[in-house]
Image (cartoon, grey):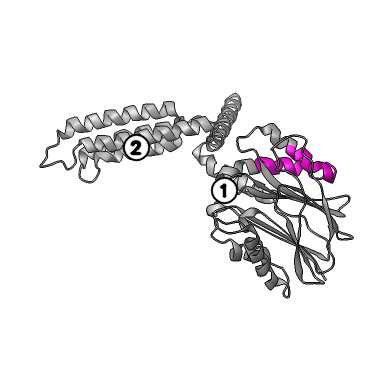
Amino acid sequence: MARAARTQTLTARTRKRALRARIALRRSAVDYFRGDGSDWIAFAGLLLTVPALALATIAFPVWCAPSALVLPIVAGGLLLRPASLLGLYAAAAAALIAESVVLGPYTAEDSAGRVTPGTVLVVAACGLFGLLIAQFRARVGVPWRRGGTMLFDLRERIRAQSALPHLPQGWHHEMALRPAGGQSFSGDFVVAARTHGGRTLEVVLTDVSGKGMDAGSRALLLSGAFGGLLGSLPPHGFLPAANGYLLRQDWEEGFATSVHLVLDLDSGDYELLSAGHLPALQLHAGTGRWEETAAEGPLLGVYDGAEFHPVKGTLRPGDVLMLFTDGLVEAPGRDLAEGVDRLTGEADRYVGTGFTGAAWHLIEACAKDVNDDRALLLITRDA
């Protein structure tokens, strides 16, 4: 019985040790994938690849050229930290020296399978680029395995923050955002919320200075801040608070234009406050004409104590309100009024059929190949 007890105890200890080892290995793998763990696994694997390639080159120089050493070097630039990468480079240099000694010096007549100066230059150039990439990753603190995931997550967050809330029956909205150059990040963004028990719709359309990737990071920061301010302050206090926030960032390109719509969903009455933004356009169903609704206010982030004066209006049944950024109507060599006329002319085509899906098509028709961020928001009240 004592022997059986000792056997069971040994078995239990072995299972516990195996479980601990499995948990530790799993944690190490997760940390490595997230970029928080050590790179010793990748370093060991690549370090073993170097002598394997050297032996293959010595045995089959025609099929495995000396320049094959760039493969672990390139992989090391993506996987390893700079300190580990230098160790890998030392191993690759030793492998080149060994190949050169064993295969013999190259000649002008027969250099196949030999270590030539060109081979050394190619390997050295790949090593230099790999070291630059590794230093950049170390400085940024984002490993290559997570870099693409992080950018994808940022893009989806911007899209989620730009989503408009559901509107009650009788109201409809359309929105389209198009970054410059077909990129994934835009300097234009929208934040919206329903306040006062859902009776009021507040929408802020902002155009950050710059375009595309250059303005994308600032747009992400501002969209989060503006989303927190919207609904937490009285409508007339939003733009002054946003202006103060932008001034505190002390950016070199620290200005933005913005328009703030406050719409009563019961009556259709609205207030429009602008910070250097283009006028809104309202289609009056009774006359079939578009009218500019312009509010006064300076750019955000220019000076402290700025005042923003609202303009009032009403959306009656059948009316449409259009908010947009300058990339939709401005173009080199074209007057702003001409761009607005073209936009309203294209929008007239949807008066009879409704504006469902019109925002995307209007950008396609008016500013398809413009190298600037474009945003368009349509709010319609059913007849």
Report helix, strand or loop for mark 2. helix
Report helix, strand or loop for mark 1. helix
User: How many numbered circles are shown?
Assistant: 2
Instruction: Give 196 or 312, whichever is nearer the viewer.
Output: 312
Q: Tell me the quarter of the image containing the N terminus.
A: top right
- The answer to which quarter of the image holds residue 201 is bottom right
Magenta range: 220-243
Kind of residue indicated by mark 1: Gly
> Would you name the residue on which mark 2 appears?
126
Instruction: Give 46 or 267, whichever is nearer the viewer.
Output: 267
- The first of marks 1 and 2 along the sequence is 2
Q: Residues within 10 Å of mark 1 (few under 14, many from 20)?
A: many
Position of residue 66 in the picture relative to residue 2 (left or right): left
Q: Is residue 52 above or below residue 288?
A: above
Which residue is pictured at 60% across the width and 52% down the height? Answer: 373
Q: CA distance from mark 1 to mark 2?
A: 31 Å
Q: Position of residue 140 (x, y in %)?
A: 53, 33
- Which secondary structure type mostly characterizes the magenta part of the structure? helix
Which residue is pictured at 61% across the width and 55% down the height? Answer: 327
Q: Residues within 10 Å of mark 2 (few under 14, many from 20)?
A: some
Position of residue 10 in the picture relative to residue 301 (left or right): left
> Would you name the residue on which mark 1 appears?
212
- The answer to which quarter of the image holds residue 16 is top right
Q: Position of residue 168 (x, y in %)?
A: 83, 61
Q: Position of residue 277 (x, y in %)?
A: 70, 50
Position of residue 248 in the picture relative to residue 310 (left or right): left
Kind of residue indicated by mark 2: Cys
157 is within the stretch colored magenta: no
Instruction: Give 209 or 290, whichever is nearer the viewer.
Output: 290
